[in-house]
Image (cartoon, grey):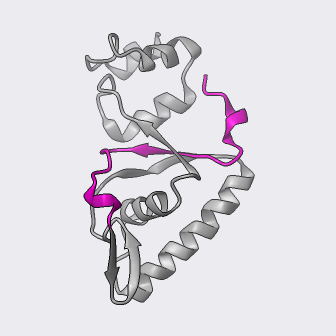
Amino acid sequence: MVKYSFFIWLKYVLNIMPFSQGDKKVSIINGISFIGEGIPKDRIGGGIIAGNKGIWEKYKEIFDRVHKKYIEAGIFWGKEQDLMKSMVLENINVFSLIQIRPIIPEKWFYSLIYLGCSENLYQRLLDEQRNKEVKSFESLRET
């Protein structure tokens, strides 16, 4: 099981696709600086995130700041993955990225398994030799 005592300043988010060097470049859009170029790219899954009360307050502060930048720069902000990508890149020390393993049939649900799994399944997810083959959710529940 994931040890929640480490959540003091970390918010766990699902890293759908690794960040590229281009994602880390600073760009200016309508006079506003962005890390990640402000370009739509799915990097972070926004549907399932976890953290304690303190980090949720920090998350809201970061979200409000990044959301305001998107509005001021005239960038579409209606897709949470884009906002979250900017939030993570501009505040990398606040977030902990959950790296997807190929064992899960649908990548968007990986964090549900990761955050709520048994100790046995958690160890299996970390084991590079045992997580290369896609398994059904039912068989993972039995682990």
> Up-down: is 95 above or below 111?
below
What residue is rendered at 25% in x and 16% in y? 133
In the rendering, at what x and y percent does residue 16 appear? 34, 44
Residue 71, by quadrant, is: bottom left
What residue is rendered at 39% in x and 17% in y? 138
In the rendering, at what x and y percent does residue 79 appear? 36, 66
Residue 33, by quadrant, is: bottom left
Residue 113 magenta: no
In the rendering, at what x and y percent does residue 17 appear? 30, 45
Quadrant where the N terminus lies?
A: top right
Magenta residues span 1-25
What residue is rendered at 68% in x and 36% in y? 6
What residue is rendered at 61% in x and 27% in y? 2
Q: Nearer the viewer, residue 92 or 121?
A: 92
Number of dots carrying numbers: 0
Residue 8 magenta: yes
> Up-down: is 142 above or below 76?
above
In the rendering, at what x and y percent does residue 24 appear? 34, 59
Specify whether 119 is left or right of 27: right
Q: Nearer the viewer, residue 20 or 80?
A: 20
